[in-house]
Image (cartoon, rainbow, N blue to C red):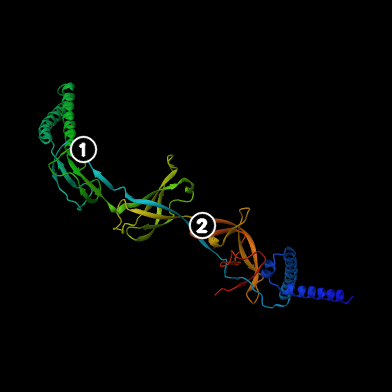
Amino acid sequence: MKQPYIFTVLCLSMLMIACGDDKKQTVEDVIATSNAEIIKEKRVSLVEEQQVLLDQIKSLDEALSKYDTIKKVPLITTFTAKTEIFNHYLEIQGNVTTKNLIVITPEYNGILTNVYVTEGQKVSKGQLLAKIDDGGLGQQVAQLQIQTELAKTTFERQKRLWDQNIGSEIQYLQAKSTYESQARAVDQLQQQIAKTRVTAPFSGTIDDVITDQGSVVAAGQSQLMRIVNLDNMYIETDVPENYIRNITKGKNVEVNFPVLGKTMVATVRQAGDFINPANRTFKVEVGIPTKEKDIKPNLTAKLKINDYTNENALLIPQSIISENADGEQYVYVVNEKGSNDEGIAKKVIIKTGRTQGDIIEVLEGIENGAEIIKEGARSVEDGQTVKVINL
């Protein structure tokens, strides 16, 4: 009887020792046993321990939220919305031109016998620039003038006799007709001779002498010289038709000449009323001050034309605007701001207008004086406590 009792006690002792050792065994030790029952028991034990730890952590978090006086809140910067003047500009490219820039062509066929000007020479309106050989028209005029003088004398004598009722009426009319026809013939030849004289159509500068003296020229075809006047230059550009109400005469224009590195302020001197059906644009002319002598025709210019002005606009950076799933734009403002510079972030739906660079006009949603979140706007949530750290 004694031996079975001792065996039972030994078994119980070994079981108790095994249970105690199981809690001390590592996961690696349990896996090394290759015993599925022991591995299952170890997993169940760890899951139970994990749940206990999670419950304890949750209790600690609840206690911290209740008793911790130092809270971590997002740090943001803000700016105050204020009404100001907003000028929107249409940016477009144009070219410098002038109506006083032409290439002179002859009105008469012949040899260019004389060129009286040189490149760069200033000339006055009507000044003789060149002469074309008249082909003997001068001699014909001289002969016709002699015949005209004789016809005139004959007519005057016949008229005196007719006034005294001497002679026949037919003689008087024939003398008158002969004189008038001779006078008209002289005028016609003189007009032809006048075409051999090339004169300046306006005052300006000879920019280029194209045809040399002694060359044969053809009426309306040969290019003799180029004359330009820089006193009435302007910039011409094509503006899309949807701006026809906004781009009007007198509008301010900021003009930049990239090649010259020069910027100036000008005005629209003419806005066309005709829409080009090919590209749906209308012509706009921007005057250039006459003192700008370094500006030349065909120079490229970049124009910024004021097409919209709001005297009381609320402007914000486009970078702080977000958009929700419905396509609505919104920003965050700070409400209930305390003495410690902490407040509540509130999402505000806005309606925007025109943009200029990174600035956009707010039409609805924000009032004058609202404190708008700038830096940190995309990391806060509606109703969240935030701290303002404006410097």
- From the viewer's side, name the closer residue of 240 and 6: 6
List x then y, in percent, for residue 89. Answer: 46, 56
- Whether residue 301 is visible here, answered yes or no, is yes
Instruction: Give the number of the disc on residue 233.
Output: none
As drawn, 143 above or below 241? above
Q: Which residue is mark 2?
A: 355
Assign the N terminus to one quadrant of the image: bottom right
Q: CB of mark 2 within 8 Å of CB of mark 1?
A: no
* Residue at 81 percent of width and 73 percent of height: 11
Residue density around tag 2, few if under 14, some if 14–19, many if 20 or more, within 10 Å: some
Assign the C terminus to one quadrant of the image: bottom right
As drawn, 190 above or below 34? above
* Residue at 43 percent of width and 44 percent of height: 281
- From the viewer's side, name the closer residue of 329 and 200: 329
- Whether residue 62 is visible here, answered yes or no, is no
Front label number (2 vs 1): 2
Query: In the rendered view, does 132 fall on the left or right side of 73?
Result: left
- Name the residue furthest right: 1
- State the CA–CA distance, disc 2 to disc 1: 56 Å
Residue 362 figure quarter: bottom right
Q: Secondary structure at mark 2?
A: strand
Query: In the rendered view, does 292 fall on the left or right side of 34?
Result: left
Q: Which residue is mark 1?
A: 107
* Residue at 57 percent of width and 56 percent of height: 352
List x then y, in percent, for residue 347. Answer: 64, 62
- From the viewer's side, name the closer residue of 36 and 135: 36
Q: Secondary structure at mark 1?
A: loop
| Residue type highlighted by circle 2 | Thr
| Residue type highlighted by circle 1 | Glu
